[in-house]
Amino acid sequence: MLVYIILILILGILSFILTYRELGRSDPNYREKSRPHLKFLTMIYGVAIIGSVIALVVYSGTQ
């Protein structure tokens, strides 16, 4: 079970990093238009990661 928790954390951190990397595009118009969407997407990733970890901890505690 610990392997799955670590895998989820790694994937979550990777998705977070890649999303923020998209904010660094060189086109100023793209940056201004995409910034609110990418911040919202990053928040969704954060909530999903935290929820997944909590669900795994609860599930592993009932086993």
Image: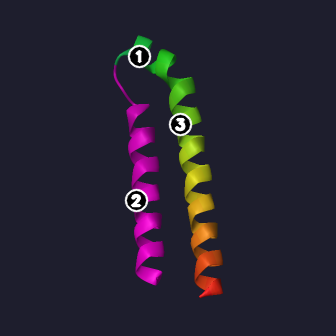
Earlier residue among tags 1 and 3? 1
Q: What's under tag 2, amino acid-wise?
A: Leu
Q: Residue at x 43, y 74 (%)?
A: 4
Q: Secondary structure at mark 2?
A: helix
- Main SS category, magenta section: helix
Is 11 one of the magenta-colored residues?
yes
Q: Which residue is at the front of the view, 31 or 56?
A: 56
- On the image, the x and y values in percent for residue 9 come to 47, 65
Give the class, few, some or many, for how many residues have Cα within 10 Å of label 1's Cα (few <14, many ≥20).
Answer: few
Instruction: Find numbered disc 1 in the image and state the secondary structure of the residue it sits on.
Output: helix
Residue 52 % position (x, y): 57, 62
Give the magenta-colored segment's residue range.
Answer: 1-26
Q: Residue at x 45, y 65 (%)?
A: 8
User: Residue 58 occupies which quadrant of the picture?
Assistant: bottom right
Q: Which residue is mark 3?
A: 41
Circle 2 or circle 1, nearest the eye: 2
